[in-house]
Structure formats: structure tokens, C-alpha cells
């Protein structure tokens, strides 16, 4: 059975047929995606489903990954932080290393294509080292909020972006003025992946037991990398404010790690220290392929939190909504696109706000369940992979046909 | 787009559409900046925020049918201007120039009477976006009014936008594609009239679908469904 046939069961024949018709108009374009890791993080998860689907749609797509020494990932983690506005100190030698690793990779990777999508800043300098004519169009895909970046870093990146024919951001609020077109494509989730597919009840219960969580008592959950922008300490503070009113409550902070995130261990130590010895509070450091575990945790939660202070799109919010859970999210980034007060959850600005809204949702079970149903349908309509794939195809068509307004193809 | 002689009417070609959205890199923080933006942005930006934003409306979450009215209400807290812009129907204007002039007049008038320029708080800025609409044939060719009624119940809301909102823009407010096709078939004057009377800009796409379904149910005379169409 083809992948697309399997997806038809979730999104319907009509949606898949429309994708095929759009893809037909692209005439088998050769497409390459380049990022910095095959495992861990939202980009790798997106590419894992996108590449085979593009191929099934008749396009010629493949995935390349840049590699470099450990020091390179420390530098690109600083890029990641600096791009999102955290103060960072970058030396000339850091930029030199980034530049050199890009040069080495450009010679090693297979980048011959009509369109190359470069994800995030790690491989951003590749166009500088690729022979003219090898790539039809370069498109830079920025997955984070780049609206207030570190100035020195942005000057460096801006020079690299000048070689691209277009950029893609998740939200208009994440952009800065650039000379090339800035397309807007929110990301999405794969409903059949291990992280989002339905799982047997026995497996769910077994997962909770294995992690030391009582299946009989309510569970609050935040799933995210151990990153200060995700405010895991703020989540624990909210839980502490709630606990006197709901002593039966449990909290799990489940975090993955990624190859390209060397800061995660440090934040994990901070969080574990702050959590103390509360038996109802689990800080779970999960391997990057623990998708079914995360799936089981999300399905077991009574309310899911994503109390980020800065956020890209917030795919963990999408995942929770897909599983019918109301989400309490920090009012930032893509969370504001997904969490609508009283419809799919609540946006909050502080641990106190989070505790207050959790109390509300615990008090009104019917409203909680209704929000869960609305959230599920909301994701089906707007944030499943079919919509994202359609946006990519439409963008490529748009770039092939100059002009504004309406285009009938 | 579905032309042909009355007794040789071509089937209705069902189209789907999607937007390629592009950020302009420009944002407004206060009412004065909004006025400046409305005066100077390309037509495609106004078209997106006044018309195509209907494609982004979710679950009847929004009170007003366009982004500018919503931002005045939610972002600036200017409820008077929000209400006024909410009432601007861009499809009643033959061109974006007319919409622009109306908006400029409203915002100028409002600014004239205010002692302080309203600002939004950080994070609630209006980020200006433009879009290109790509429409494509779904391969579904509808041959009878009954089949059209059935299709309206299941077609994606994007198709509804193309055949109603976009058609109205294309025809300077005169007609949607459904009623234009039915008109060619003849025998459906009442249905055509009812479809054209729908206040579509006031409705979100889900509500519009329901309204169209109701109109077809109440007005489609089954015996007339045998109107001749070429295979």
C-alpha cells in the first residue's frame, strides 16, 4: 500500500487527489532538502514524511544532512539562540568555522536539483560554494522566530540569504525585511507517525507504569526539548501553585535531545534540581526516537502545557490538539495560531496564569472535552501534513509563474 | 468560465485554490501606521487582509470579516473603528482603489477625532501580508444542478471561496460562478436570484456552505435538473 493511500484514510480521497493534481503541474522537479540532523527536532520529523510523499507525488526528492565537528554544533546552537534573540557571544573564529564546514559539505553533498530547500542557519552558506548552474533555485527555510536576532549574527546571515531566490518563515511575525520573497508556511504533523497514530490502550497503560506514572490519577504534561525558552521551571512553578488545590495531580516534563543541541544536558540538570524529590513530578529525558512514549503520554494527559517564552511554531501543541487535549500555552510564536481562548485552550503569560487556567479546565470537564474535540478538528483542517505539502507545491508553482493576483494552472 | 449556449451549456468545472502567502516585512504598531500602510501598500496586501483572509477564518472564532477590523478591535482596542471597518464590504467596490479610499477616509476621520493615537501592545502588531491565489482544475466536471448541490455539501471550503468570493471579485461584484452557470442553463431564475442575494462577506466559509445548501434544498426543482448539458 502506498503512503498516500494510507493517508487518504485520515484526510480523505479528495485532499490527496488535489495534491496529485497540483504536483502534476510541477513536472517531476528535482528537489533536495538539507538540514543538520536526521534524528531529533521538528525539522527531521517533517522531512521524514515529506521526502517519501514528494516522491510518491511524482517529484524527485531527496534529503541531505550536513555534518561537522562537535564545535560546529556548539556554534550553530549559539546561532539558533542568537537568531531567536538571546544574547550570544560569537567570535570571528565561530563564523569562520561555520563557513568552512559549509564549504566542506558543499563539496560532499549531492545538491544537483531544480530546487534546494536549506533548513535553518546551519547549512545556510551552501549556495556560496555550489557551482553555478547546479541548483535552479535556492530557498532558505527558517523554522524559528527571527524577528529580533542578534545584530552581528543577522549581518552574517543576511549576506548568506542574499544568494537565495526565496525564503520561507512559519509566521509573518517571525520575519525581518529581506530583499527576496518571504513565503509563509506554517509547519504540520504527520497523523500516521509513531508520535501521532492511535495506540492500543494496553500500550498506553504499560508506558505510564514503566515511567512511574499512576494511570488512575490526572496528569499534566509538557513535551519539549530541555531548553530555557520552553520555560520548564515555569511549568513546575505552575504545578506547585496548583498542587494545594489538586493534591492528586501529577506532572511530567518529557524532553528529547537532539544531535545539534549541546545545551540540553545543562538545562536538564537545572530542571531536575528544581523538581526536587516530588514523587508526582517526573522529569523524563527520553531518547530522540521515543515517539510512541510521547504519544502515550500525550494521550494520557488531562491537560497539556506548552508554556514557552519564545517558540517556533510549537508542533507539540499541534500534536496535543490532534489527540483531543486542551492546551495551555505561552502567548508567543506559533502557539498563538493554535491556542484560541475558550476554543482550543488558553494562552497564558505567567506560571500563575497557567495554574489558574488548569484549575478552570479541571473544574469544567464538559468544556475541557469540547475544547479537545474542537482542537482535533482544527488540526485536521489546518495543521496536518497535507496542508503543508500543498503550501510547498503552491509556492513552487507560484515561483514558476511570475505575476501577482490570481493564477489558474 | 463556464460559458456556452443555453442548450449546449458546458459542465461546471470545479476548481480548488490555495494561497501562496508572502510577508511584506512591514508591520503596524499604531493607528497612524495603519493609515500610512493603507495609503501605500500594494493592492495585493489590501486584497489579502480585506478579502482573502476569509480563507483563514477558523470555527467562527472571529467577529469581523476582515483582518483590519479585527486588528483595530483586538490589537488597538479601538472598538469604534473596528465596527466601522467591519462594515466595509470590499466586494461592493469595483476595484481595490475604491476599498483603499474608503479605508483611508474612515481611518483619517477616526484619527481626526482622537486625542491620542491608539497603540497595540508588543506582540499584537499587524504584520502585513500579500498573497497570490493559485487555482487549479480538480478534474470534477458537474453536469446537473442536483450534482452541483451535492458537490457543495462536500467540496473543500477553498473551492467555495474561489467560486463565490473570487468570482465576485472577478465580476466586479456581479455574480458567483454557481449562479452564473445556473443562469446559462435557464429555468432556475429563483435559485439564481437567491444565490446572488447571499450576503456572503458577512459569513465565514462554513456558514456560507450551510447557507448555499439551504438555498439549493429550498429552491432546486428536481424536475428542472434534467436541463440539457453537453457530456
Image (cartoon, coloured by chain):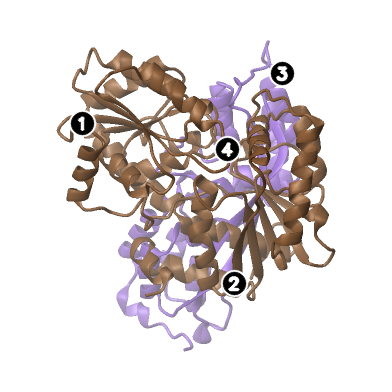
Chain colours: A brown, B purple
Mark 2 or 3: in front is 2
Say which mark, if any, is on residue B112. Answer: 3
Tell me how far mark 2 sits from mark 4, CA to CA.
36 Å
Which residue reaches farthest left? A216
Mark 1 or 4: in front is 1
Q: Position of residue B103 (x, y in %)?
A: 68, 35
Mark 2 or 4: in front is 2
- Quadrant position of residue A13: bottom left
Q: Position of residue B52 (x, y in %)?
A: 58, 49
Of residues B175 and A63, the one drawn nearer to the viewer in this rendering: A63
Is residue A353 visible to the viewer in this orientation of the structure? no
Tell me how far mark 1 sits from mark 3, CA to CA.
49 Å
Q: Residue at x 49, y 62 (%)?
A: B159
Mark 2, residues whose alpha carbon is within 10 Å: few (<14), some, or many (≥20)?
some
**Horizontal arrangement in the rendering, residue B224 relative to residue A79 (left or right):** left
Subunit of label 3: B
Say which mark, if any, is on residue A59. Answer: 2
Of residues A382 and B74, the one drawn nearer to the viewer in this rendering: A382
Tell me how far mark 1 sits from mark 4, CA to CA.
33 Å
Say which mark, if any, is on residue A334. Answer: none
For the C terminus of chain A, give its image quadrant: bottom right
Of residues A78 and A145, the one drawn nearer to the viewer in this rendering: A78
Q: Position of residue A274 (x, y in %)?
A: 40, 17
Q: Residue at x 47, y 31 (%)?
A: A226
Mark 4 or 3: in front is 4
- Quadrant position of residue B81: top right
Tell me how far mark 4 sits from mark 3, CA to CA.
22 Å
Amino acid at each position: 500500500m502506498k503512503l498516500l493511500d494510507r493517508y487518504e484514510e485520515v484526510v480523505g480521497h479528495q485532499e490527496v487527489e488535489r495534491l496529485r493534481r497540483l504536483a502534476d503541474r510541477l513536472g517531476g522537479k528535482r528537489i533536495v532538502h538539507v538540514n543538520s540532523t536526521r534524528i531529533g527536532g521538528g525539522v527531521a520529523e517533517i522531512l521524514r514524511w515529506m521526502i517519501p510523499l514528494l516522491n510518491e507525488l511524482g517529484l524527485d526528492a531527496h534529503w541531505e544532512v550536513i555534518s561537522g565537528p562537535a564545535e560546529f554544533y556548539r556554534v550553530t546552537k549559539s546561532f539558533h539562540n542568537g537568531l531567536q534573540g538571546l544574547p550570544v557571544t560569537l567570535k570571528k573564529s565561530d563564523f569562520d568555522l561555520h563557513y568552512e564546514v559549509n564549504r566542506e559539505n558543499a563539496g560532499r553533498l549531492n545538491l544537483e536539483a531544480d530546487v534546494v530547500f536549506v533548513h535553518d542557519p546551519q547549512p545556510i552558506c551552501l549556495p556560496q560554494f555550489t557551482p553555478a548552474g547546479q541548483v535552479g533555485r535556492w530557498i532558505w527555510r527558517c523554522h524559528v522566530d527571527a524577528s529580533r536576532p542578534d545584530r552581528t549574527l543577522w549581518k552574517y546571515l543576511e549576506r548568506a540569504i542574499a544568494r537565495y531566490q526565496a525564503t520561507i518563515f512559519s509566521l509573518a511575525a517571525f520575519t525581518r525585511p529581506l530583499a527576496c520573497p518571504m513565503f509563509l508556511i506554517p509547519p504540520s504533523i504527520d497523523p500516521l507517525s509513531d508520535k501521532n497514530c492511535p495506540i492500543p490502550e494496553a500500550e498506553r497503560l504499560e508506558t505510564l507504569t514503566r515511567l512511574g506514572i499512576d494511570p488512575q490519577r490526572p496528569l499534566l504534561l509538557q513535551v519539549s526539548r530541555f531548553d530555557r525558552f520552553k520555560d520548564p521551571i515555569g511549568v513546575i512553578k505552575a504545578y506547585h501553585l496548583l498542587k494545594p488545590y489538586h493534591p492528586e495531580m501529577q506532572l511530567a516534563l518529557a524532553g528529547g535531545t537532539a544531535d545539534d543541541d549541546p545545551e540540553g544536558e545543562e538545562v536538564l540538570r537545572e530542571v531536575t534540581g528544581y523538581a526536587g524529590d516530588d514523587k508526582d513530578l517526573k522529569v523524563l529525558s527520553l531518547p530522540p526516537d521515543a515517539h510512541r512514549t510521547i504519544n502515550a503520554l500525550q494521550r494520557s494527559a488531562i491537560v497539556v502545557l506548552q508554556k514557552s517564552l519564545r517558540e517556533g511554531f510549537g508542533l507539540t501543541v499541534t500534536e496535543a490538539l490532534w489527540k483531543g487535549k486542551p492546551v495551555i500555552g505561552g502567548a508567543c510564536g506559533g502557539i498563538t495560531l493554535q491556542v484560541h481562548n475558550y476554543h482550543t485552550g488558553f494562552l497564558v503569560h505567567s506560571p500563575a496564569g497557567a495554574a489558574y487556567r488548569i484549575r478552570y479546565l479541571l473544574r469544567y470537564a464538559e468544556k475541557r472535552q469540547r475544547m479537545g474535540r474542537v482542537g482535533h478538528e482544527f488540526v485536521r483542517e489546518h495543521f496536518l501534513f497535507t496542508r503543508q505539502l500543498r503550501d510547498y507545491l503552491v509556492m513552487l508553482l507560484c515561483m514558476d509563474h511570475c505575476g501577482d493576483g490570481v493564477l489558474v494552472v | 468560465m463556464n460559458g456556452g449556449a443555453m442548450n449546449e451549456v458546458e459542465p461546471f468545472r470545479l476548481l480548488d485554490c490555495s494561497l501562496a502567502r508572502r510577508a511584506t516585512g512591514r508591520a503596524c504598531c499604531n493607528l497612524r501606521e495603519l493609515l500610512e500602510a493603507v495609503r501605500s501598500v500594494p493592492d495585493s496586501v489590501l486584497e489579502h487582509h480585506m478579502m482573502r483572509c476569509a480563507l483563514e477564518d477558523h470555527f467562527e472564532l472571529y467577529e469581523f470579516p476582515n483582518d483590519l477590523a479585527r486588528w483595530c478591535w483586538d490589537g488597538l482596542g479601538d472598538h469604534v473603528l473596528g465596527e466601522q471597518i467591519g462594515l466595509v464590504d470590499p466586494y461592493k467596490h469595483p476595484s481595490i482603489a475604491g476599498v483603499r479610499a474608503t479605508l483611508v477616509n474612515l481611518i483619517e476621520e477616526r484619527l481626526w477625532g482622537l486625542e491620542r493615537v491608539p497603540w497595540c501592545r508588543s506582540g499584537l502588531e499587524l504584520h502585513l501580508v500579500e498573497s497570490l491565489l493559485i487555482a487549479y482544475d480538480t478534474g470534477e466536471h458537474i453536469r446537473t444542478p442536483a450534482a452541483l448541490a451535492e458537490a457543495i455539501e462536500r467540496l473543500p471550503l477553498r473551492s467555495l471561496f474561489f467560486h463565490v468570493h473570487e468570482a465576485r471579485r472577478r465580476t466586479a461584484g456581479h455574480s458567483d460562478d454557481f449562479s452564473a452557470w445556473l443562469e446559462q442553463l435557464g429555468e432556475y431564475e429563483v435559485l439564481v436570484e437567491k444565490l446572488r442575494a447571499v450576503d456572503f462577506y458577512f459569513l465565514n466559509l462554513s456558514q456560507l456552505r450551510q447557507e448555499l445548501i439551504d438555498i439549493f434544498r429550498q429552491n432546486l426543482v428536481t424536475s428542472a435538473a434534467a436541463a440539457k448539458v453537453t457530456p
